[in-house]
Amino acid sequence: MKTRRLYQNGECVALVTLADIYVYEGFRFEISYGRPQKIRKDGEPAQREGRKFWDAYYAWQSLPPVEREKYRV
C-alpha cells in the first residue's frame, strides 16, 4: 500500500492510501490488508475468486520480489 499526501497552498490537506494493483496471467488483483482481492475490469472488487485465480496468485507470490514488481500496474 502506498500513502500519498495531497497539498493545497503548500499545506497537506489529505492522506490517501492506495493498494498496489497487479496484473498476472490475465487476472487483475490488489493486495489490501494482507489479502489479495480480485478486481474486475471496471475497478470494482470481483464477487467470486475461483480456483484459477488462486493458482495464478500463488504462482505470482512464488516469484522473487523484484520479478513481482514487473506486474504492478
Image: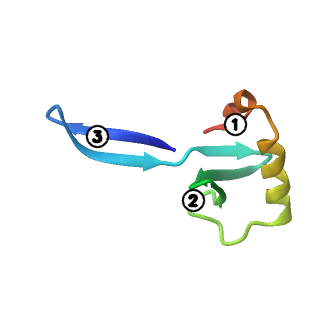
Q: Residue at x 56, y 57 (%)?
A: 43
**Mark whose residue sits in front, 3 or 2:** 3
- In this view, the residue farthest toward the bottom is 47
Residue 45 percent across, percent down from the top left: 60, 64
Report the residue marked by disc 1: 71
Horizontal side of residue 50 vs 17, given as left or right? right
Q: Between disc 1 and disc 3, whose residue precedes? A: 3
Q: Position of residue 33 (x, y in %)?
A: 56, 55
Residue 11 to residue 58: above or below? above
Rounded to the nearest angstrom, the CA distance separating label 3 from label 2 is 25 Å
Report helix, strand or loop for mark 3: strand
Give percent across and percent down for residue 41: 63, 56
Marking on residue 6: 3
Judge from the rendering whether residue 36 lies leftward or rightward of residue 64; answer left or right: left
Secondary structure at badge 2 equals loop
* Quarter where residue 64 is shown: top right
Q: Which mark is residue 42?
A: 2
- Residue depicted at x 56% and y 63%: 44
Color style of the picture: rainbow
Mark 2 belongs to which amino acid?
Asp
Q: Amino acid at mark 1?
A: Tyr
CA gap between label 1 and label 3 equals 26 Å
Quarter of the image with the C terminus in it? top right
SS of the residue under disc 1: helix
> Residue 32 at x, y = what percent?
57, 54
Q: Residue furthest front?
A: 34
Viewer-proximal residue among 26 and 62? 62
